[in-house]
Amino acid sequence: MIREMCKKAKVAAFEMGKLSTDAKNAALHKMASALEANTEKILAANEVDVQIAKSKGVKAALLDRLALDQKKIQTVAKELKEVSALPDPIGSIISTWTRPNGLIISQVRVPMGVVGVIYESRPNVTADSAGICIKSGNAVILRGGSDALNSNLAIGEVLREALLSTNVPVDAIQVVPSPNRKVAEELMGMREYIDVLVPRGGADLIKTVIEKSRIPVIETGTGNCHVYVEEDADLQKATPIVINSKCQRPGTCNAAEKLLVHSKIATQYLPVVIAELRKNGVEVRGDEETRKIVPDVKAATEQDWGTEYLDLIMGVKVVKGLDEAIAHINNYGTHHSDSILTTDFGKAMQFIKEIDSAAVYWNAFTRFTDGNQFGLGAEIGISTQKLHVRGPMSVQHLTTTKYVILGDGQIRK
Amino acid sequence: MIREMCKKAKVAAFEMGKLSTDAKNAALHKMASALEANTEKILAANEVDVQIAKSKGVKAALLDRLALDQKKIQTVAKELKEVSALPDPIGSIISTWTRPNGLIISQVRVPMGVVGVIYESRPNVTADSAGICIKSGNAVILRGGSDALNSNLAIGEVLREALLSTNVPVDAIQVVPSPNRKVAEELMGMREYIDVLVPRGGADLIKTVIEKSRIPVIETGTGNCHVYVEEDADLQKATPIVINSKCQRPGTCNAAEKLLVHSKIATQYLPVVIAELRKNGVEVRGDEETRKIVPDVKAATEQDWGTEYLDLIMGVKVVKGLDEAIAHINNYGTHHSDSILTTDFGKAMQFIKEIDSAAVYWNAFTRFTDGNQFGLGAEIGISTQKLHVRGPMSVQHLTTTKYVILGDGQIRK
C-alpha cells in the first residue's frame, strides 16, 4: 500500500513541478474554503477520535491538542490563505554566471519532489503541512498519530476533494490510512520515492524517525533553550525577558528552559528573578550555588540540565562567567535558541560566535525563533540540525536547486 | 576509540570556528609543504599498500587508484594551495533585516562542525578532503579503504605534524587507524559528535553508508548520465559532444552512459554516431530499434538502462520524442547530469524544467558538472540528493548558517 501511495506521489510531484504560482494559490484557496464548508464532517470524525482517546484515559494536554472546534478549523483555513499570499520560491534564479568557455550557468530553485511528514496527535498539522507542501510545489504523504486517525482521514478527504476542481493533482495530498507502526516504518524506507522526511512532534518521535529512516530527515523541534544574564546586564530589562521567555507559552520548543546567572550578580539578582518566576507559577530547580542564595529552591539534578521541560519549570545555575556559560549551553543545549543579556559588545560578540545554535540572541527573548516572527511566513518546524536548513523551516526551505547550463556545443579538452 | 576521536574532533571544531581566514590559509600552505617534504615517507607507506594489494590480486584499475608517485603528491600539494586561495565562506552575512519590533536579524555562514568522510582506495582523498574541511572551518575524521590504510595513516601523520606549527588544532585532522568494518559502523552512529557524513566512492559504498548511518549523509557520486539528440539537433555539433561526454574520461561520474536519439533522425544519425563511438573504442549496446538500424550492435538488457558503466560502454536507445526521453531519464537516471541537443527553444525549456537532475544541459557536454569547471573551486563530491546541496559540493557547501538576533529587551506579547 505504501509503495503504491509513493508511486502516486511521485507522479503527482512531476505534475506539481510544472504548475504556475496562480494554479497553486488557487488550490490553496479552494482547500481553505473546503475546510470551512466541511466543518461539521471534520468535527464529527474528530469527535470519534476524542471519545476513543478519553476511553483510553489519555492526558488532558493530549486531548487538548487532539480536539478540534470550529475556531481551530477557521484558523487553519486562514493560515492556508496566508500561505497562498507568500512569495513563490519556485523558478527563482539564485545566481547566473558565464564561464570563460561561454557556458552560461544558472542555479534555479525547484521543488523538492515528495515530502513525507510524520507527526503526532495534532490534526491541524495535516492541513497546514499540506498547504506548505503545495505552495512549495511538492507532493506530500502525511502520517499522523494513531489517536487522530479519523480526523486526519476526514481532513485529507476534504482537501483532496477540493483539489478535484483545480490543476493540482489529487495525489499531491495523501494521508496514510493505517495507524500501524510497521506501515510507518515502511514509509521511512521509501528513499526511492520520498525526497525528505520531516518529523513533527516530541523528542521520542524524532529519535525514532532518525533511527529508522533511510530517507534524509530534517530534525525539528526539541528546544532546551537558555537565557544567560551577564554581570553587566541591564537587570531592568533582564527580568521581563526571563519571565516572558519562560512563561508566555511554556509548551513550545522556543521557550526558555534554563537560566544561567553570572556569579558576581547572583546574590543580588537571584532572589529577585526567582521571586518573579514563582509569582508566575514557575517551579525553580537550582544548582548548589543558587540554593545557597535562595535556600528553599529545589535541587536540580544532572538530568535537569539536558531536559526540555515544556512546562512551568526552570533550571537555574550560577556560572563563573561567559566561558562557562558558553560551554554549558553547547554541552547541554539542543542547539535551538539561546540568549545573552549583556551591555558589553565584546561579550555579546563572543557569545554569538561561540554558541552553536540555530538562533543566538543578544538582549532578546528566545521565543522569537518562529517563521512568522522572523518574517519568513508559516513554518513546518524549527530545524535544529545543520544540514539544509537551520532554524524556522518555511516554504522556501522545502525546495532544492538545479543547475541549468546553456551551451553552444562546448566540449572539454 | 571512535568515541574518543569524535570527542577530540568536537573540541577541535570549536577552536576551528574561531580561526581567522589567514590562520586557516597559513595551515593549508604548511600542509602542502609538508606533503612535498615528506614525499619519500608517504611513498614508502604507499608501496606497502601496493604490495599487499598486488599479492591479493586486485584489479589494475584499483591498483592505479591506490598507487601514489611524486607527481600525484605534488598535485595534491598544489590543490591544497589552490583551496587556500578560494574565498572563505565563514562569517559572510547572507542577509540582514529589521523586524517591525526593532529586532535586527542576520543569517550568518558558520562551519558545519565535525565532518566525517568515508572513502575507498584513493589515498589522495585523505589530503584533499582535509584541505576542504580546514578551509571551511571544520574538523574532519577520515576513514579510507583498508587497501590504502598505510598510505592514509602516513599522509595523516604528515598533515597533523604540519599543523603543530599553526593555529589550527592538530585534532582538526584525524585518520581512523583501523580497517575494521565494525569501526566504520561505529563511526556512522556518532550523531552526537559528527554533523555530516560524506561517502566518496562507488555505488556500493554509498548504499552501505545510507543504510547504516544515523548521521545526516550527503549522497555523492553515481552518475548514469544521458545525452538526448532531438530531431532538430545540429548534428555537426552533436557528435563531438557525444564522443567527448563518453570518452574524455569514461571512469568519472559525469561521463555520459546513455545516448537517446529521436526516432525521426535515428536512421540517418545512428550509423554515423555508432561508427564514431566504435572508432573511439566504445562498446555500443542498443535497444531493438537501434539494432534494426545497426544490426551488429549488442542487445541492451533492461539492467543496462540503470547501469553506470564507468567504462567505454554506451547504451543507445531510440525514443519517439521529448516526452519519452524525459520519462526515460527521470526513471532510469541517477539525477546527476543530463543533456539535450536541440536547436528548438521550447523543447530545451521543457527538458530543463522536467528533468529532475542536479545539472541539466542544453547543447553541451555532461562532464562540465565539476566544481572547477563550474568555477566553484575544489569539490568533495557531486551531490545527487536534494537536501542541502545538489551538484558539485565545494568549500561553501561544508558550512551551515546561524541566525543572529540583536535586540534591546524585546519581548513577545
Image (spheres, coloured by chain):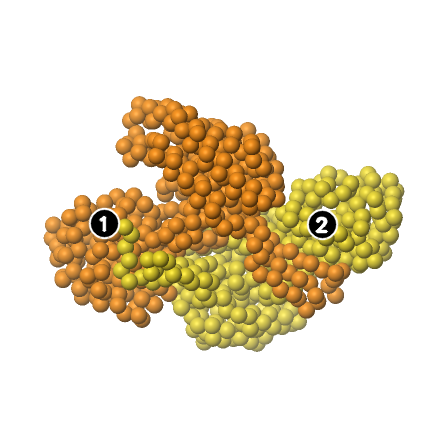
Chain colours: A orange, B yellow
In the rendered image, the vertical position of residue B42 relative to residue A295, given as above or below: below
Q: 10 Å neighbourhood of mark 1: few (<14), some, or many (≥20)? A: many
Q: Do the residues labelled 2 and 1 touch (CB within 8 Å)?
A: no
Disc number at residue A314? 1
Q: Which residue is drawn at 55% across and 73% down?
A: B85
Q: Nearer the viewer, residue A110 or B9?
A: A110
Picture coordinates of residue A52 (x, y %)?
34, 24
Q: Position of residue B38 (x, y in %)?
A: 57, 74
Q: Is residue B4 above or below residue B22?
A: above
* Residue A272 visible: yes
Tag 2: amino acid: Gly
- Please state the chain letter of the residue tagged with numbered disc 2 in the rendered image: B
Asked which secondary structure carries label 2, the reply is: helix
Q: Where is residue B22 in the image (x, y as percent from the top left)?
A: 47, 75
On the image, the x and y values in percent for residue A401 come to 57, 53
Let me know if residue B54 appears in the view.
no
Residue that extends furthest to the left in the rendered view of this protein: A295
Quick check: A285 left or right of B94?
A: left
Q: What residue type is labelled 1?
A: Met
**Residue on which the image places disc 2:** B346
Quadrant of the snapshot with the N terminus of chain B: bottom left
The residue located at (74%, 60%) in the rendering is: A408
